[in-house]
Image (cartoon, helix red, strand yellow):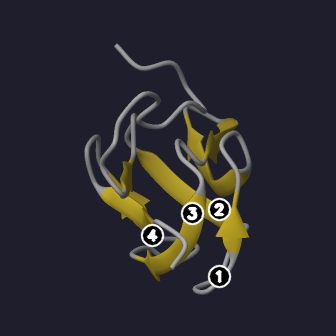
Amino acid sequence: MKAAGVGARGSDSPELKSPMAGKVVAIAVEVGQEVAPGETVVIVEAMKMENDLKAHRPGVITEVAVSAGQAVEIGDVLVRIDDVQ
C-alpha cells in the first residue's frame, strides 16, 4: 500500500496516480514546469485531511489531468511527468 503523499514512488511510469479517494483542493504545478522528486504537485483532501502528493520522478509536467474541486478515486491520473528533453 502506498503512503499518503508518496504517489507512485519507485515507479518509472510518467503518470502520478492518486493513492487515495478524495477531492483535489490545490494544484501546485503547471504544464511546462520542471519538478524534482518529492516536490508537491497536487493536494488532495481525504477524510478531512489535506495530503500533499509529491512528484515521484524528476521531469517536466506535460499534463495536469485534474482541476481544483474535482473528486478523484484511487488510481486516477493526476499529472504526467515526462523526461526533460
- Using the numbered discs, state the Cα–Cα distance from disc 4 to disc 2 in whole angstroms: 8 Å
Q: Is residue 79 visible?
A: yes
> Badges 3 and 4: C-beta atoms under 8 Å apart?
no
Please name whichever residue, 34 or 41, is drawn nearer the observer in this view of the structure.
34
Rendered position, 59 above or below 56: below
Rendered position, 2 above or below 80: above
Circle 3 SS class: strand
Label 1, on which residue? 30
Q: Quadrant of the N terminus?
A: top left
Closer to viewer: mark 4 or mark 1:
1
Of the image marks 4 and 2, the number of the one nearer the N terminus: 2
Of the image marks 1 and 3, the number of the one nearer the N terminus: 1
Left or right of 62 on screen, residue 59: right
| Image x and y of residue 57, in percent | 53, 46
Residue type, numbered disc 3: Gly
Circle 1 SS class: loop
Left or right of 67 on screen, residue 27: right
| Image x and y of residue 13, in percent | 30, 49
Circle 4 SS class: loop
Closer to viewer: mark 2 or mark 1:
1
- Using the numbered discs, state the Cα–Cα distance from disc 1 to disc 3 in whole angstroms: 12 Å
Q: Is residue 27 visible?
A: no
Rendered position, 41 above or below 44: below
Left or right of 25 on screen, residue 78: left
- Using the numbered discs, state the Cα–Cα distance from disc 2 to disc 1 in whole angstroms: 15 Å
Of the numbered discs in the image, which one, if any, rests on residue 25? 2
> Badges 3 and 2: C-beta atoms under 8 Å apart?
no
Closer to viewer: mark 3 or mark 2:
3
Please name whichever residue, 26 or 77, is drawn nearer the observer in this view of the structure.
77
Label 3, on which residue? 59
